[in-house]
Amino acid sequence: MKRVDRPLLSFSACARVLGARPLAALRVGAAALSASLLLSACQDSGGLSSSRAWKPIPAEMVALMEQKGSNKSAPILLRAFKKEAELEVWKMRADGTYAHLKTYPMCRWSGQLGPKTREGDRQVPEGFYTITPGQMNPNSQYYLAFNVGYPNAYDKAHGYTGGLIMVHGACSSAGCFSMTDEQISEIYAIARDAFAGGQRAIQMQSLPFRMNAENLAKHRLDPNMKFWREIKEGVDQFEVTKREPQVAFCGRRYVFNASPADASARLDANAACPPLREDAEVKALVAQKRQAEDARIAELSATTQPIKLRYADGGQHPSFAHVMMVSRPEALAQAPVEIELQDKNKPVPAAVKMAARSAPAPAAKPAAATASASVSTQAPAAQPDAPSSAAAFAPAEPAAVTAPFYKRWLGLGEEAPAASSASASGAAPSAASAPSTSSKRTPAASNGKAADARQKTSSALPAMIRGAQPVLPSGLLAYARPND
């Protein structure tokens, strides 16, 4: 027999049952529906989500807060680092400064380094965001979750689209910060108790990587560096003061710990910035930090090849390499590709120029042999001057053809070297002799067997999202960065 799905009660049937007119029945039905929705928002799967959301903070975490000079009701601040796949929780002390509480290894994040710009790009956003009590979601399909507040005023001013970017459990990401269920349970409880203690909003700093000299030197030519330098101003202010930077927007950019010099003016992300008043002491501390850091970046830039990282689809912390129940395991099996960028403005050290001038000219090599060699490892022929780094490290020119013109024209002259004849004819080099591209692939983080195992378990992801995933090995929450 064919099954026909019918509504439990039509509006007219409801009127007959209630003995009321259809309009009155409609009002009663609407009230009942509202009550039903309100009730369903408080519970999920028989009240499981509600119980998850009210788990207390573990006793050892409360003890750690007290060691840091804080307590479970004090405000918190969050920091996320995509490249390192880590999420930090900071706690406010009695003097208003923040102390690092704990670093959680991130189970999964998706996309690439760089800001989120459009709906569906699978990007984890970057910038400074605000989490309010209304953004906490105890009924998430991903165990527990809270919305980070993307897009903010900066994102909107630039026309970026998308939303509903969460920190949640289940180790599955399509643009979110994904933790394990155990981790999100603890982080959610810490945030919940901070709100209960009176905190109105939690600041979350979402960053591409730890903004130290090493990372800045390595990524100095990345197209996103201008934006990263902009948000680094807020990072620097937090790191020198250990106080939450006040975030505002004007001129379609971030401004930190600044207010209009004219008290009647206001800051608007889409309007030009008015004259600003800043804290002179904090500004001096940031300048001092920046000076030392820039010197270190310049030192590293002389020996570090600038790169851009390209991920198959995000990454995860190495401590979760054994976990198979993640979203898109086949993407995680591929390590990010390092694309080498050409630093045209990089100065050539004087010692290198001197060695290049005094070194004898090497014998000409076949094109196939010279193509695969790195430009930076070849010694040039003696030259009076090296106007640029490219000239200083260029390979030697092939020997000139000495046969008379008429013999060369009739094909009776000396045979020209292979590299010279190829360049004279204008023919493109073959695939075997073509120069290597500027990108190189880092070896995969796992071997073929591990990649196969990840692919075989990808079909189990829907079950995991429903909360049926196996319990992860114990001890993951004990992870902490050294010297913390």
Image (cartoon, rainbow, N blue to C red):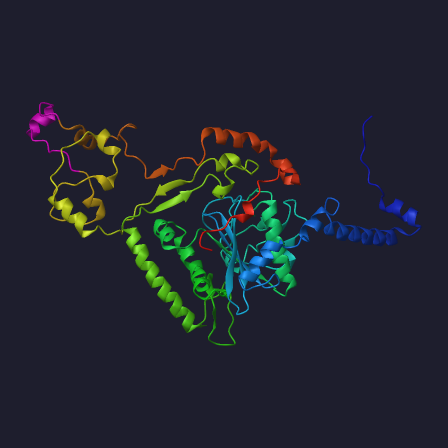
**Quarter of the image where one finds residue 152:** bottom right
- Closer-to-camera residue (398/180): 180
**Quarter of the image where one finds residue 439:** top left
On screen, residue 389 versus residue 107, left or right, reads: left
Residue at the limit of the structure toward the right, as seen here: 19
Q: Position of residue 435 (x, y in %)?
A: 28, 34
- Predominant secondary structure, magenta span: loop
* Magenta stretch: includes residue 406: yes
What residue is drawn where x is 11% and y is 23%?
411
Q: Position of residue 236 (x, y in %)?
A: 42, 62
Q: Quadrant of the N terminus?
A: top right
What residue is drawn where x is 43% and y is 53%?
210
Q: Is residue 481 above or below residue 371?
A: below
Give the extent of the magenta segment. Answer: 396-415
- Closer-to-camera residue (346/156): 346
What residue is drawn where x is 46% and y is 48%?
84
What residue is drawn where x is 51% and y is 44%?
110
Number of numbered callouts drawn: 0
Q: Is residue 52 above or below residue 230?
A: above
* Magenta stretch: includes residue 356: no
Q: Position of residue 409 (x, y in %)?
A: 11, 27
Q: Position of residue 63 (x, y in %)?
A: 58, 58
- Closer-to-camera residue (323/143): 323
